Amino acid sequence: YLVPTADYHESEYVGTYFKARTYITGFTGSAGTAVITQDEACLWTDGRYFVQAAKELAGTGVTLMKMGQEGVPTVEEYLQANTKEGMTIGFDGRVVNEMLGETLEKTLPERFLSYRSDLIGEIWSDRPALSAEPVWILDSKYTGESAADRLAKVREKMKENGAEVHILTALDDIAWMLNIRGNDIHCCPVVLSYLVMDEKEIRLFANEKAFPESVKKALSADGVTIYPYNDIYDYVQTISGEKKIYLSRSNVNSRLISNIQEKVTILDGENLTLLPKAVKNETEIQNEKIAHIKDGVAMVKFIHWLKKNIGK
């Protein structure tokens, strides 16, 4: 059974609900992958965490696999060596992106991959609830352009790529495009959500209770309708087989893609928000300069305090 460090959106950092790898191994670092067999459990992490992981895994029965060290197999190599034809490798397909899922299929032939087994969830009795922190709209004095402008840019990109539907699951991209912010991941101002858009409508799959009426009204004015967070998996099954869907296989989870009709044409590429988000407008440039000044002042104050107080 494979337990990566991920949420349903391939975020670099994850909320408490998604810390399944921490729960099952006891290792609290931000990066790592656990593999559990009937005979042993192993945890892969990188050099930043070798000391920490050794301490946290002591006495747990979990073996530390130091990534990049001589003689240490990769996760894929370990699975190849420790599974046989006909065996099943399980994982929650919502926390494994489609690119990794395809890699596993290619490198582990004759094994059965079980995408729908959230075994950690079945035994984690006191699992924290999914975050639903209040959502707010980021004012145009910070963004420099409206959500309508950004939606228009992305729709133009859809036309250029011959796509009728665009599926976005990366939380920072959704936040950028709709000018929404939240606190669903510590120190990352994002909102747990999926977004599906076409030429006429935008469906945002999220916890509606986190959206104040004023935010729902603003989103509605831009053609955004909110649906229950988990309904995305049922909805993508209804997308007609004649449609062309643009998405990023390295961002979208394997469970979601497995729910799309086989007849649907999937156009794979970087999220269409990526480049427009990277090109900052004048307002954003000025705000970045202000942020750097504030950050610099805070750092200098700290250095001054440290010099005055070191040794006391």
Image (cartoon, rainbow, N blue to C red):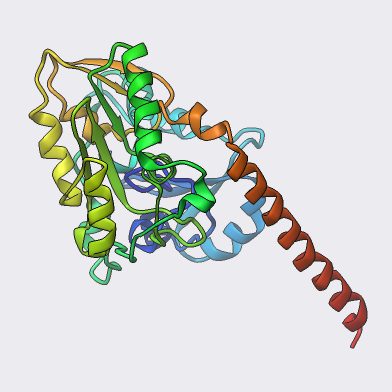
Q: Nearer the viewer, residue 172 or 264?
A: 172
On-image quarter of the N terminus: top left
Q: Quadrant of residue 14?
A: bottom left
What percent of the width, then of the height, locates residue 58?
54, 64
Q: Quadrant of residue 164?
A: top left
Q: Nearer the viewer, residue 93 or 259?
A: 259
What percent of the width, then of the height, locates residue 89?
27, 35
What percent of the width, then of the height, locates residue 299?
78, 65
Q: How many marks?
A: 0
Q: Nearer the viewer, residue 205 or 127?
A: 205
Horizontal arrangement in the rendering, residue 273 relative to residue 267 (left or right): right
Seen at 41% across and 62% down, the residue is 183
Name the residue furthest bottom.
312
On-image quarter of the C terminus: bottom right
Q: Nearer the viewer, residue 5 or 50?
A: 5
Position of 265 relative to 92 (above/below): above
Seen at 41% across and 42% down, the residue is 146
Horizontal arrangement in the rendering, residue 205 relative to residue 277 (left or right): left
What percent of the width, then of the height, locates residue 297?
78, 65
Seen at 31% across and 15% down, the residue is 159
Q: Is residue 87 visible?
A: no
Q: Quadrant of residue 266?
A: top left
Seen at 15% across and 51% down, the residue is 228
Position of 260 relative to 15 (above/below): above
Horizontal arrangement in the rendering, residue 80 relative to residue 211 (left or right): right
Q: Is residue 110 visible?
A: yes
